[in-house]
Image (tube, rainbow, N blue to C red):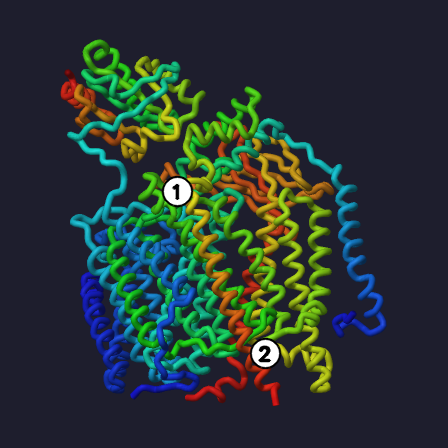
Amino acid sequence: MHAVASGISSRKARLRITPALVLALAVLTLLITLIGLVTYRLLVDVGPPLAVGQPAPEFQLETFGGERISLSELRGQGVVLNFWASWCGPCRAEAELLESAWRREQGRGIVFIGIAYLDQLPAAQRFLEEFHVTYLNGRDKGSHISRQYDLLGVPETYFIDPNGILARQHKGILTDPDQFQRWLDQIRP
Amino acid sequence: MWNDLAYLGLVAGAILAGLGILAGFHGGHSGHAAWTEVSRRALIGTAGIVILATVTLWSALLQGRFELRYVVSQTELALPVFYKFAALWSGQAGSLLFWAFVLSLYALLMNAFLGRRLPHLMPWANGVLCSNLGFFLILCIFPANPFAKLPVAPPDGLGLNPLLQNYWMVIHPVMLYLGYVGLCVPFALAVGALAQRQLDMTWIRLIRRWTLIPWLFLSIGILMGSQWAYMELGWGGYWAWDPVENVSLLPWLTATAFIHSIIVQEQRGTMKFWNMAMIGMTYFLIMLGTLTTRSEIVVSVHSFAQSSIGLYFVAMLILALSGFLFLLWRRRDALEERVAGSAWISRESAFLGNNWLFTGVAFATLWGTYFPVISELFAGDQIAVAAPYFEKVNGPLFLLLFLLMGIGPLLKWRSTPRAELQRKLRLPLGAAAIAGLGSFGLAPASSPYALLGFAVCALIVAATLQEYGLDIRTRQRAHGEGFREAAQRLLQRQSHRYGGYLVHLGMVLMGLAIVGNEFYQEVQHVTLARDESHVTGNYTLTYHGMIVEDLANLTQFRAVLGVEQGNGRELQPLQPRRNVYFKNPDAPTSEVGLRMTWMEDLYVVLNGWEDEAVSATFSIYRNPLMIWLWVGGLVLAIGTLVAMWPHPGSRRRGPG
Amino acid sequence: MHFPRLVPRAFRAWLASAYLRFCLTVGLSLILVQGATALDVGIHAQSLQEQEMYNIARELWCPLCAGIRLDACELQACVQMREEISLLLAEGRDKAYIIAYFEEQYGTQVHGQPPFTGIYGWAWWTPLLLMAAAGITIGNRMRRAAATRRDSSQRTAAP
């Protein structure tokens, strides 16, 4: 039994297109879009396509010395791309390994590039001096490069082969010199 | 063994809830009382199982049963019992079970109190609550099992997130859950009313009360969260417009809009559709909020949990939304607005304005909270939408809301003559002028908002008191009562209305604190050597040294700061602290040193210290009027209780 | 001129005429009080330049955190960013330059709010447009309702 309470008319309402209806539909559409967005965000890992075996994203970098370099200029050489920051503790742990490897590899077809992520000029320079870093280094202005490389945090190191193909991405500290050497051999021209 | 049993119980509970859904909706549809009874028993049975399972998890946490993954991830042996108790809702799986637990309590209460008063609605309401309980049980059974075991039980747990080890963080989530989850009950009652076309006075009165109860808890929960942020995060503020904070505010906003607009339905019989839409919206925002908090869609400092439960929520959201929309569509005849003409200057238009602003704030907050996700999709990165955005968009809207809070009570239903409004506005406007100019004179702020804020607060107080005074006067005349007698009678007879006004006054007090903190905060960052002093405002602070103390699961560093007032009186020293937890040494937490007075808070954060604590760095804030935020919360709570209190005569008037 | 009946009759007329003047006088005299107390300034141990640095940091947001202001952020990165501000101030740069510099270096995140232009502008316009649309709709409905009310009152008034 339906309990029909007072104050309610039972006649059918005709559907009129009123501004209120349009507005209600607009709000509804927005809500559904929101659900859609949330679903999309849950299902798909949004971000630029970055995959091992695919071309590494092109970038331009202004080094601390004022020099401008781009990835495409370095075709024909292996590239080690190291994202770091002076405020990052673990980055200190791998700094010596990177610099010593660079000194060894210099002139043997592999280029090292350091990219400082959200770093501050004086502190970054102090860091480079402290570890006597001699390979090219620059600040990632506006974090554009970091975003292209899907950076989760620092340190991260990317190995790019002479054809500009991303050969390996390593999230976290480089700890094992032998392993690092093997990875370098992979991108040697 | 108990834990396995509890898990099996969850499975049984989910099946029982499924039965409850079918019985409830079928019973509601067919009108067979037997099915209604089945749904009631299924709901009570499920609730009982959930409560038992929760108690089991609690005892596992308290006893340190480290064979359970959840117990390991949230506790440790040395954790104080107080926080072991709170570990139930600090992690993903536990908090979902806790959700179901709170809903179970509400389900039992709803059946106990409303079973006989709204008998026709009950099967539907039972069905709705069963589907919610069932949903959270499914989450606990599949993606987030709180009783999941580890292959080998470790000797000790990983410890609780240090940020949560604060007494406010124990009570605040409970309040928030009581509010959040409780707002499912009005949704269930709305579904029942829609299905049965029962939108009469009894229903209005009951749904109002059952909205006010969770609304009160939610208000208190939000305020306690601010208190936690104020004491623990140490940036001198209480509200960061952080995604997790925002999603707790969203259902509060729509529920507040509903609490106001249901008055229009009660008095004038209009806004039926709108009220239903607001209840549905509140429920939608609760689910969206839980989803947002529990899965890291939007990055937040408060996101303590992450997992794959998001898609379950999306499915539930789509189901609930489409079901509710279908029901609204089918019952559009019952919700058709009877055109009741009201003048521009009338109580109705004030309520309309109120709802326009509340939903506006809610939409802007929702939009801003999720905009990073949108920008990520279209522009490739999650743009930061932080406090400046919300302050710029919501600030003016809140100011208008406060203005309406002052003017609204002066207006009459249907129509108010312009001259009457002008006459009634004179005293409040005068008060506003004094307060605005006075505040500008006493303490010039950089923003005209500060001046306007104080002015509007004064306007509300004056208008409300004037209204009360006029009503007393009228009653004195009509009944020949004395002033005190009339004042008391009026409060008793119209407790709904005056309770509401009391809530308004609570909001005014909070408004004062917000204006004070927002526009008059003073902050200095200083490094003090031992016995060096710093003068701020009326205080001289002297750093005396550091006390280091090992507690059960942490080392506490307390800087001792002597406080001397301008008149040379020595006050209790402040002890801003740093807690370094043994299990999480990289995430030291801060506890501020605080001296609260009626005028301002002296609020000191210990930022760091040199070796041997020969010198230490502090952030010293002076936050004017902050205490009124908490006092205002208290007044709000009292006002809500007054407004909720049953009328002396209402029980007799209501049917059944 | 009427005044709330609460006020005793004898005062009502006086109040009604002098009321606003009175309010303004009280307000203005409070401003004078402020003038007298403005000299009471404490001696701060904090250097002016440091204060200036924190004033600028207060308007910037930590690009590494969600919703934490740069002046209150305790990350090493933020400490270094504040150091950077101090250095730029020492170089004689002004606030506008420093904020622009931060935007260039660390992205728009440092503003804590989306820009007003381009696709980000929709963060601002959408709520505004929607509220305007809702306001107009409500206004229209009220006008229609008011019109019907007038009609019906005229009908009842007619003999």
Quarter where residue A159 is shown = top left
* Label 1 packing within 10 angstroms: few (<14), some (14-19), many (20+): few
Query: Where does residue B294 sit, x and y in percent of width and height?
Result: 32, 53
Which percent across, then down, holds residue B432? Answer: 69, 58
Q: Nearer the viewer, residue A100 or B153?
A: A100
On the image, numbered disc 2 is attached to which residue? Answer: B494
Q: CA gap, disc 2 to disc 1?
A: 51 Å
Badge 2 crowding class, 10 Å Cα cut-off, few under 14, some 14 to 19, many 20 or more, is few
Left or right of A95 on screen, residue C143: right
Q: Which quarter of the rendered picture does the N terminus of chain B lie within? A: bottom left
**Residue type highlighted by circle 2:** Gln
Going by the picture, which residue comes out furthest to the bottom?
C159
**Residue for point 76% across, 49% down:** C30
**Comparing labels 2 and 1, the label whose residue is closer to the camera:** 1
Residue type at mark 1 is Ile
For numbered disc 2, what is the local secondary structure? Answer: loop
For the point 28% across and 34% down, which residue is it?
Answer: A150
Can you see residue B124? yes
The residue beneath circle 1 is: C119
> Front-most of B162 and B16?
B16
Pointer 2 indicates a residue of which chain?
B
Compared across the picture, whether B572 is left or right of A11 comes to: right
Residue drawn 27% across and 42% down?
A46
- The numbered dot on residue B138 is none
